[in-house]
Amino acid sequence: MMKWLKIKEEHLQQILEWRSSKDVTRYMYTDIPYDLDNQRKWHMSIKEDTNGFYWVIEYKGELIGYISITDINWKHKSGYWNFYIGNNKYGMLAGFLGAYMYNFAFSSLPLNKLMGEVMASNVGVRKMHSKQGAREIGYFEKHIQKNDQWHDIFLYEMTKEKWISKGSKFHKYIPDVEVE
């Protein structure tokens, strides 16, 4: 059973370790300093964010990563979803996170569309979006500068209607989610 737990103070050290590791940060837009005080400030900001949900992922009793829905536009019922697997032992689960997210977002939240942005170099996550039926909208050329190098960013979207018609083979992927 996959669980998404609301981020608590006790998770911050683990999230910081994941977020500052080379395996994770190479696909992130920014690198962050290894600073627990900054992590606490980030935690305070997400606790007050009324347009986002933030969780740590637990699988078989182990914390394995982070997943979120951010920048929710409640009027237009859309948002962005984001994730990373910090525990390399469970890297293969990344391929199923889209199904878990779409099933949750389109059945438990009043959302009609989820979008994602992926660095061009993150071929595995780009394939995951396509495999689960997300539409590749296009890409922003040389959109992010990181480590003195420009990166293209690919954009994906999934609508509730498309998920209902295309996602039936993923119906069993339902996370146990803490929302309050």
Image (tube, rainbow, N blue to C red):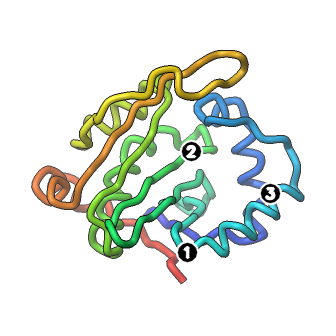
Q: Residue 82: give x, y in percent of width and height.
A: 50, 50
Position of the C terminus, as image quadrant, is bottom right
Q: Residue 170: give x, y in percent of width and height.
A: 23, 54
C-alpha separation, residue under disc 3 versus residue under disc 1? 19 Å
The residue beneath circle 2 is: 85
* Label located before the other in sequence (3 or 1): 3
Q: State left or right for residue 166 relative to residue 96.
A: left
* Label located before the other in sequence (2 or 1): 1
SS at circle 3:
helix
In the depicted structure, whether residue 123 falls above or below residue 4: above
Q: State left or right for residue 58 relative to residue 47.
A: left
Position of the N terminus, as image quadrant, is bottom left
In the depicted structure, whether residue 154 falls above or below residue 19: above
Identified at 82% across, 63% down, the residue is 40
Residue, far left: 165
Quarter of the figure with residue 34: top right
Residue, far bottom: 180
SS at circle 2:
strand
Identified at 62% across, 35% down, the residue is 29
Disc assigned to residue 72 = none
Please state which of the two labelled residues, at mark 3 or mark 1, is closer to the viewer: 1
Q: Nearer the viewer, residue 102 or 168?
A: 102
Q: Residues within 10 Å of mark 3 (few under 14, many from 20)?
A: some
C-alpha separation, residue under disc 2 versus residue under disc 1? 25 Å
Three-letter residue code for mark 1: Thr
Disc assigned to residue 50 = 1
Q: Residues within 10 Å of mark 1 (few under 14, many from 20)?
A: few
Disc assigned to residue 39 = 3
SS at circle 1:
loop
Q: Are marks 3 and 1 in contact (CB under 8 Å)?
A: no
